Amino acid sequence: MSAARELKRAAITAVGHFLPEKIMTNLDLEKLVDTSDEWIRSRTGIRERRVLEHGATSDLCTGAVKMLMENRGIGPEEIEVIIVATVTPDMFFPSTACVVQEKLGAKHAWGFDVSAACSGFLYSLVLGAQLIETGAYKKVVVVGADKMSSILDYTDRNTCILFGDGGAAVLLEPTDDPSLGVIDHRLYSDGSGGQFLYMKGGGSLQPPTHESIDRGEHKLIQDGKAVFKVAVYGMAEVSAEIMERNHLTGADVDYLVPHQANLRIIDACRERMGLDPAKVMINIEKYGNTTAATIPLCLSEWWHAGKLDRGNTLVLSSFGAGYTWGAILLKWSIPRKVTA
Ligand code: UT7
């Protein structure tokens, strides 16, 4: 008779991130489109973003996973699964996860990509956690990375000022402490929102042609106002929902870790949750919207800065193209990093 697998929670046991060195400031963008530093800062909270000049999304992933492995003291051959959340894969296929597996030398790992735009990391974290919880795997890497500069139209002031490049990763492992790890989640999709944020060209609907390129169909298109309205409501509601389901008040939450699309969306979410401003992770001013990378980038930066401790209660929350949105309740499990 086969023994039943013991259910264990999945905990984040290491974090890492990778940011390109090149900084593109709002002043740099003033030279490209009719915009101003003042407009961008007041409407979005962004001051600058990073741009990957050479390389692809897999390089952002590889850099982030290398930092994570160093922190945890493991080698690439110990990784069992690699999940990459991205809307800017190196190529349609093979998956970026396969490219990353090869670049890292993670020869015992299998992996796949997840396309859920700004909610990609949350979707992937839930998938990775379930692989751990079933007892099937013990080391799952979840990466969120996007080279948004590769799909931006730098003549469109509505979109090019918003996004940046970056990657970040977490390692999931089983924990014996049931009070830690990925505790609960709510994930949603609504395909009727697809018309407001998309990249039309390059797929089976519109294979690339000279004409489709001339029409700008291989670049990101967004109706910012339409997305803003639903994002501001959706992210706040799902964050409140995860708190209510788990009988939490603002006082019980140590950090909101929001997707970084717009400071005004983050503020509305914080208010709905009844949180003190000091309890919100915000780095949008430095990186803009790095799509799948925003949430793990915050986790990695805050832990490296010694601002996250074992037992902290976190609500991760996102809204993005699809539409896709969701929230995860997480109990942090890595002890505070001692900083100099
Ligand atoms: O992460 C994926 C999900 N995406 C989001 O969550 C993004 C949601 N949307 C937003 O964050 C905001 O809608 C934006 C930041 C994209 C735009 O802010 P807004 O306050 O909604 O501005 P708007 O689109 O209503 O535009 C206001 C004005 C317009 O001019 P008029 O029509 O009032 O004369 C725009 O043409 O600002 C103008 N404008 C700009 N001006 C200077 C639009 N973009 C710019 C710009 N610089 N870059």
Image (tube, rainbow, N blue to C red):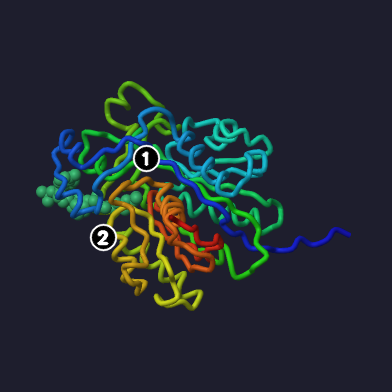
Residue sticking out furthest to the front = 340
Amino acid type at circle 2 is Arg
* Residue in front for this viewpoint, 253 or 328: 253
Q: Looking at the picture, how far across and down is residue 162, in whole percent? A: 27, 45
Amino acid type at circle 1 is Asp
Residue sticking out furthest to the top = 210
Quick one: label 2, few (<14), some, or many (20+) residues within 10 Å? some
- The residue drawn where x is 34% and y is 74% is 274
User: Which residue in the structure is indicated by mark 2?
Assistant: 264
Q: Is residue 57 above or below residue 132?
A: above
Name the disc covering residue 173, or none: none
Q: Earlier in the sequence, mark 1 or mark 2?
A: 1
* Residue in front for this viewpoint, 142 or 75: 75
Kindly indicate whether the residue at mark 2 contacts the one at mark 1 (C-beta within 8 angstroms). no
Front position among marks 1 and 2 = 1
Name the disc covering residue 165, or none: 1
Residue sticking out furthest to the right = 1
- Label 2's element? helix
Quick one: label 1, few (<14), some, or many (20+) residues within 10 Å? many
User: Do we see residue 39 in this rendering?
Assistant: yes
- The residue drawn where x is 27% and y is 57% is 263
Q: Quadrant of the N terminus?
A: bottom right
Q: Looking at the picture, how far across and down is residue 44, in whole percent? A: 24, 53
Ligand 1 under 8 Å from disc 2 Cβ: yes
- Label 1's element? strand
Q: Looking at the picture, how far across and down is residue 72, in whole percent? A: 59, 49
Question: Is 275 left, or right, of 59 in this rendering?
Answer: left
- The residue drawn where x is 33% and y is 72% is 276
